[in-house]
Amino acid sequence: MATSASKKRSTSATKKKARAAKSSGTAGPGKGKSASRTPKNTNSPNGKSASRTKQSYTGKDIQVLEGLEPVRKRPGMYIGGTGKPGLHHLLWEIVDNAVDEAANGYASQIDVTLHADGSSVTVTDNGRGIPVDMHPTKKIPTLQLILTTLHSGGKFDSSNYITSGGLHGVGSSVVNALSEEMVATVKRDDKTYEQRYRRGKVASKLKTLGKSTRGSGTSIFFRPDSEIFESVEFDADLIAEQLEVKTYLNRNLKIVFRDDTAGKRYEYHHEGGIEEYLGKILGDVKTRAVHPDCFLLRQDELRDGARVEIALQWTELPREHIVSFVNGIPTRDGGTHEAGVKEAVRAAVKAYMDTHDLVPSKMEVTADDIREGLVAVVNLFMVDPQFQGQTKDKLNNPGARSLVVSALRLDLEQYLIARPSTGDAIAARVIQSARARLASRAAVQSVRSKPSVSHRLNLPGKLADCSSTNPAESELFIVEGDSAGGSAKQGRNRVFQAILPLRGKVLNAEQATPSKVKANAELSNVLQALGCGMGDQMDLDRLRYHKVILLMDADSDGHHIATLLLTFFYRYMRPLIEEGFVFIAQPPLYRIDSGKETFWALDDPDRERIEKSIRRKRKDAKIDVQRFKGLGEMMPATLNETTLNPSTRRLLQVTIPQKQRLATETTISELMGKDAAPRFAFIMNNAAEVDELDV
């Protein structure tokens, strides 16, 4: 499971946000997350803010952002956010440019180096090298134009790149805008050229470093700006994983990754392509395939210059899992190409089952039954992909659906006919899924037919309910301990916020039977408060709160309790997570006062970063730090300001990204299951990274 920030913290009535300026040198990265900061009180005497009292609105109020200023002003529009995904999106933009060179036959190797500081990266390819000649109309070096101007690049013309992941011409320039420092080095025409940039602006003229240089290619060094990002520390494991995927999608490409933070070197080259990638996915989740060989489709001559690769296999997994890419870019939210795969699979399998009379009498087989257990990898290359947003998470081209259907449907049907044992095994898997669905529906209808008990009359005694009966606006805080629960009850908004305190650690639902889960007092209270049932009897229409927020102490015990509750939701109430109803509150561990300003730090690295920021601004500043031992120690007003109030709190939404569904299943079963061996291995592998344990 993954979490994504839903709202930044702001600590005063004005909710202004300021970031500490960092020196422009090349020192190592700042650690931890950024914190919002505001004066304690900037309201006007009459209680209205100054911005609300301003009446004039003239031409001088209209701002015009030049060059790359829009990117720095609104980075989320270009990279999706300033958290960990946004930080790594910078790297993917540069890597994807290099991959485009390889996919179009101009490069064969990419070298990626994560430097020892953990906050800067260099990406080098052996492609043609970005042009450095003077642009005919802009009269500046083409390299400078590409890296400092939005919507500039060589991918608008298909004569340069038949297919590419970046077509908007904003990728490299966005990285430049959001980097404290960028250095571009180009080898071409037997010379080496270099130009430096700072925060999107030219820091040095293009210069020639040397002559008689062998080979060609481009090297980009960049250091993300700590003024923009919550943390500028890259995740080496994530980088290694994503780079390896690139080599599955491009069979002739070799990528070398050097992790200087750990002194490690990785080399990736997978001639087996997506067929080999599918085998890796199945191995990672330790599932059994229902037929021995995967179906593999490679078509290089589709209409409009498109080509597609598809590998798929049915397994015993309880749901489908499709990993898709367009021009090597992961489309985590799917799109029209995935819709084409689903339609083609449904049509081909249904045609096979109908032709061979394999569907039992009076049984209705749905598209979901056919695709249950399907694991597929889809890699589509097309000339003009239309993505939803700059982060390219979803493909929108209407024609991609029919293109994939026409390529896949007939080939898959012929594959099944030519291998009747495989076709029959898949048909048996489909029938098994249909029977399980019908049995589940019958059980739900049986439960619903019984007289229902009023939600209000069946609530746990510990619950301090809200007065609203509208689930869309109601929130339930599940709080660790009666002491914290009492503080939360006093600090909440009684209209739409309910509080349910828990006593101690809840049952590990991964190791318990459904009957034991229902019998557990704490989990039973959670079920009664939510009112929607669990498992096959779950009905989200009866859910009483559309925000279920886990509010635990910011220590190891609190993290453990949150993990146990998330395990319960994942195993027995997964639609809560899939529909976006589950959140984790982010209470601060420290309060930091300096002069008239108050900061809230989430953890120790955040506290250290804030203190350094204050010292840089004023070396002799007096800093007072208060550490909260637990939520129960916070005054209700403080808890409201930092954690409960929707306008000032920070929540993490719990999600299961499509690409991580199988990995999530494996993680839950291994780390929370009865077998202690995987937990022991995890602890031993990660023990060296634990500097201090809060017990």
Image (cartoon, rainbow, N blue to C red):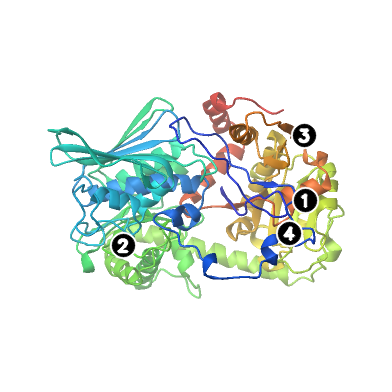
Q: Give the side of residue 80 with respect to residue 438, left or right.
A: left
- The residue under label 1 is 640
The numbered dot on residue 475 is: 4
Q: Residue at x 50, y 55 (%)?
A: 73
**Are the two marked residues, 1 and 3, in contact with CB atoms closer than 8 angstroms?**
no
Q: Is residue 325 left or right of residue 50?
A: left
Residue type at mark 2 is Leu
Is residue 75 among what the camera can see? Answer: no
Indicate the secondary structure of the residue bearing disc 1. helix
In the rendered image, which residue does mark 2 sit on?
Answer: 416
Q: Earlier in the sequence, mark 3 or mark 4?
A: 4
Quadrant of the rendered image containing residue 61: bottom right
Circles 1 and 2: CB atoms closer than 8 Å = no
Residue kind at label 4, given as amino acid type: Glu
Residues at marks 1 and 3, CA–CA distance in whole angstroms: 17 Å
Do labels 2 and 3 touch, CB within 8 Å? Answer: no
Residue ID at (28%, 39%): 124
- Tell whether 672 sits left or right of 469: left
* Distance from the alpha carbon under mark 3 to that under mark 4: 25 Å
Which of discs 2 and 4 lies nearer the camera? The answer is: 4
Q: Amino acid at mark 3?
A: Lys
Q: Residues within 10 Å of mark 1 (few under 14, many from 20)?
A: many
The label shown at residue 131 is: none
What residue is pinned by disc 3?
A: 629
Per the model, the C-alpha gap separating discs 2 and 4 is 50 Å
Counting residues from the start of the chain, the first of labels 4 and 1 encountered is: 4
